[in-house]
Amino acid sequence: MLVKISFFLLLLLGSTISSADTIDSDFLDDDLPPPRTGTSMEYRTGVWLLKIEDVAHYETVSGSDYTVTKLEVKTTAWVYALLKGVSIGFEDNKFIYDFINHRPFSFYFDEDLKDGDAADIEITASGYRLKNYYNESSTDKQIITGELVVSFSDDGRLLGYGEYGFHPKGLVKRFDGENLLGHKRKITGVKLSDTASFDDNLDITLNGSQYLLSLVGIKRVERLLDGRTSTTAVELIWNQNGLDSFVQLPRFDGYDFSFSILTSDDEVVDYSLTFNEN
Amino acid sequence: MKYILLITAILMILACSEKRNEPTSLLSHKVEFSDYGTYGRTLYFEDDSGDQWCFYNVLKVENPNYVDVVYSYPIKGSCNLDTTLLSASFRSLIVSEKVDGDSTYTLLVSGTNVNEYLYPSNGDLSEDNEEYQQYFTAPINPFAIKYILPRNGEEPTTDNSVYELKLSFKDGFLTSNVLPLVPYIEGNAYLSIMVISYLDLLDMLDIFYEYGRSLPDTSLPFPEMASGGNDLKLIRDQPYTRLYPTDEDPFVLKQIPVVNE
């Protein structure tokens, strides 16, 4: 399982294309479009367009005089994300899902790898709650270090807040290491599809073909070192290998998302993620 | 007066919210322990057949960032360096430290990186050491030893745990609650049948994992699944002696006094 996760992360990491200063990313600050007409909140599961705003604080302590360097990382992202049901069986060559007891969203941002493991999801009447923790071996206790609370409304929107403190996974090295002290996250979202990406659904297509959605979108990462802006990068989030550079910048058209890239073989490939009419 | 109270109340609320927003942290940069060095000991255990095994255990605390714990594979009978030893080194990051009393410290540690290495007999890493070269080129499953580490039912990662590593100095010796792996592997009968080398042990654990058998309950980064209370105390009480590593030989197993049980 770990190998599979690692492989997936490797793909993900290998596919983020940094393209600083070339992409107009101002739209990332806009509000999301309204929920797509025709979607239902009978179940929360389906495809969501999420806007994620994350502010993380890192600190490096170095030298014999304990010089402290502070780093603030602001990430703003628009991503398509799938809220999946839990697979509870397999019949007639199809998986059977429990859509009420769904799984949480997965993000795979840098901070998600450093803020700890999540305990089992808590499904509530209004949404879900996800707590991160570490084990204290001496007392065999689980210590909570952070929590994400996501609430859904009947009109196909969601609002989430996460707050995370220091977790041992955020420790690179006590001295001369850039350690994550904590981060805060705000998530807003609109529902785009009730069943897209499930076996018998063609709500969403990639270049005209059915597409099994994974996290895809665009993010802007601003790094402020000791309060000064040092770098801003805009990256595509895309679970594919071999993407070298943009030839057409990512853009949203309604709920659709498209971009073109130049592969390492000098081939221009257009990608268009399209939501079909209901 | 009303405005003063109102402004005071607003300031108090802002102060509270600001304080709440500060990340609380386990992480501390206060350095207490300073007697850096490399320490070693030999440890013995018996399998269910009554046969005695020995292995080397090295503890390296050389900087305020991390500690290394090294285990050699168990040798049937008494410890000796007549043969090439496969050993595993576990590195854990120090999160914080505190003084617990006179020459007694607690290091809160987390995360474990495992490095396997071969310790050549007599420290001879040259091509002339055919035994060492033979082992060195032998395929070793790099993941196998990690399967020692997970808690029941969890992925084999260890950075989701913290452990209080106790270091206490008395009469020139160091004692610590570093616990060895081998005596805690589930079922010594299994060991006595299967394990004739540490490579066998690694293979055995790999099978455990593949077939979904529950692994011994380990509290990481050092196993704490003590099967026998008396044995556990004995191991905790077994002191380390100070070693003097060199650039060529950072673990200096040959400096460890071999105590025959």
Image: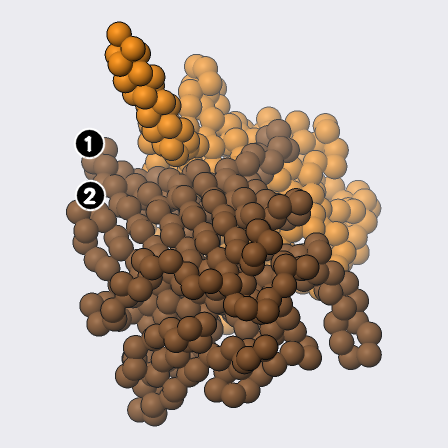
Chain colours: A brown, B orange
Residue at 58% x, 38% y: name it.
A135
Q: Amino acid at mark 1?
A: Asp
Provide residue B254's location: percent of width, then percent of height: 47, 45
**Residue B138 seen in the current view:** no
Crowding at dot 1, Cα within 10 Å, few <14 / some 14-19 / many 20+, comes out as: few
Q: Amino acid at mark 2?
A: Gly
Residue at 55% x, 36% y: name it.
A144
Q: How many marks?
A: 2
Residue under numbered circle 2: A227
Residue under numbered circle 1: A65
Where is A243 relative to B178, above or below?
A: below
Would you say B86 lies left or right of B181 here? left
Provide residue A141's location: percent of width, then percent of height: 62, 33
Which numbered disc, 2 or 1, marks the residue that appears first in the sequence? 1
Would you say B218 lies left or right of A36 here? right
SS assignment at label 1: loop
Quarter holding residue A278: bottom right
Q: Quadrant of the N terminus of chain B?
A: top left
Of A49 and B25, nearer the camera is A49
Crowding at dot 2, Cα within 10 Å, few <14 / some 14-19 / many 20+, comes out as: few
Numbered badge on residue B131: none
Residue at 47% x, 44% y: name it.
A162
Would you say B245 lies left or right of A123 here? left
Where is B27 relative to B55, above or below?
A: above
Quarter holding residue A44: bottom right
What chain does mark 2 sit on? Answer: A
Separation (CA) of disc 2 from disc 1? 21 Å
SS assignment at label 2: loop
What chain does mark 1 sit on? Answer: A
Provide residue A41's location: percent of width, then percent of height: 63, 59
Q: Quadrant of the C terminus of chain B?
A: top right
Are callouts 2 and 1 both on one chain? yes
